[in-house]
Amino acid sequence: MNKTVHIKTYGCQMNVYDSSRMRDVLAPLGYAETDMAEGADLVILNTCHIREKAAEKVYSELGKLREMKEARAAQGKEMLIAVAGCVGQAEGQEITRRNKAVDLVFGPQTYHRLPELLGQRQATGRAAVETEFAAERKFEELVEKPQAQGSVAAFLTIQEGCDKFCTFCVVPYTRGAEFSRPVAQILQEAAKLAARGVREVTLLGQNVNAYRGEGGNGPESLARLVARLSQIQGIERIRYVTSHPRDMTDDLIAAHGANEKLMPYLHLPIQAGNDRILKAMNRGHTVADYLRLVDKVKAARPDIALSGDFIVGFPGESEAEFAGTLQVAREVGYASAYTFKYSPRPGTPAAARADQIEEPVKDQRLAALQAQILEQTKAFNASCVGRELPVLLEKPGRHDGQLIGRSPYLQSVHVAAQNLSIGQIANISIKSVGPNSLSGQYVGQI
Ligand code: 5AD
Ligand code: SF4
């Protein structure tokens, strides 16, 4: 009965959540997790398709796994290889054609059927490929599965998919149409998390603020869901990611000013700082719309830390248009941001354009934007020195007697563990900043 599974996760936080639920689905079959592929009975690559290199990395990883599988077969043992996630969804059968060692291929909406797929593979001796698209049934089945113990901060997927069709993005094709889980199901999952010691939940969705889950008397908004979640005893902090500017409603903005449990951090991608490019991206908002939104959010919660995503080198982007991106990043005053070089994704409208930007130009723009964002992040972190911040202590640090936690603004904070324990929210006086984290001293418990 005792078997081992190794899951390697690529890409976004939703994949991190999905991987943890795959563990929950496999646990009743006797699978325990191992942190090495070598020697595992089942290896799952939970993949990401958002950028080109990610898929290529998967294929090269599969090459290595195939050798491992053959070595294991020579010892008379079996090792099953599975490709999950968005590459599984997008490539389907192609994966089993390119690599004959792959036993299972399934997408983000079908991993709840893993036991069945494993059975099918064993019964037929042939690879099982399942890329159906029905998130609804997945969540209904998952809510029944107990979740493994984890950290005091947990992810909870509340929404999946995207109807917006930005012209660069594969998500609408790999994760499907927007789907929101019903309110009651989410509250049930959050209550279970709280009961096992989780104090912070990060609500996940590709368009999390487009959430419209059934609440009994019709669909409820994200703001209403957050209000309900904040009533659960034990849940002290709530975050959500990723938001679209078009769905940033007034009630959600108001919640940032009114609900203490909603953390002062907002990831709100703009992608580019020029209206012509935004239009070509089919973003459905202008730079001015975005800046107005940011003003409203700051008015509701003046200390909010803003974060975003940027794509440089979208087809046809001129030097002057790129300068708009640098300008908007400065104007918004992001505390952090994720920056990407445009990568043509097969099947998306932008990939078919003739005016692709050359790689060296993209490299230059990326370096310039990253340098500026780094300065902004350093300045934001430095502005925290001398402040007292409530820090949720999450895990032991690298050094003895040290704990690492998170500030309300999502910064890592290192503290001396004396008189403190994991799961506590402690008031920490920030003393210094490192490249990626803050350090401070315990002042008192909240
Ligand atoms: N090329 C580069 N970046 C992309 N993203 C999505 N698709 C692409 C692409 N084709 C980025 C966007 C999005 C983030 C998750 O990934 O910035 O917000
Ligand atoms: Fe992709 Fe745009 Fe949808 Fe985000 S909003 S998932 S970038 S299509």
Image (spheres, rainbow, N blue to C red):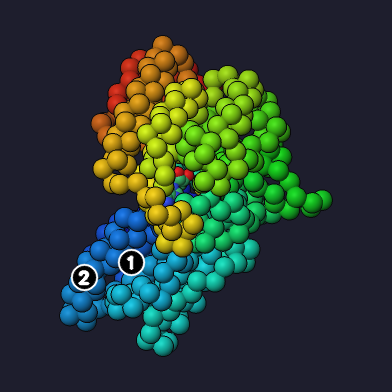
Residue drawn at point x = 33 percent, y = 17 percent: 432
State the image coordinates of residue 317 (x, y, percent, origin top left).
Answer: 41, 41
According to the picture, the residue beneath numbered tag 2 turns out to be 68
Inspect this view and state whether residue 252 appears: yes
Image quadrant in which the N terminus is located:
bottom left
For residue 354, which quarter of the picture? bottom left
State the image coordinates of residue 405 (x, y, percent, origin top left).
Answer: 41, 31
Inspect the image, locate mark 2, and give the three-letter code of the amino acid beneath it: Met
Q: Few, some or many C-alpha atoms within 10 Å of disc 1 (few <14, some 14-19, many ≥20)?
A: many
Q: Is residue 118 above or below residue 444?
A: below
Residue toward you, 102 or 124: 102
Residue toward you, 417 or 188: 188
State the image coordinates of residue 108 (x, y, percent, origin top left).
Answer: 49, 62
Q: Is residue 49 above or below residue 358?
A: below
Residues at marks 2 and 1 touching, judged by CB atoms closer than 8 Å: yes
Image quadrant in which the C terminus is located:
top right
Gap between marks 2 and 1 measured at Cα: 11 Å
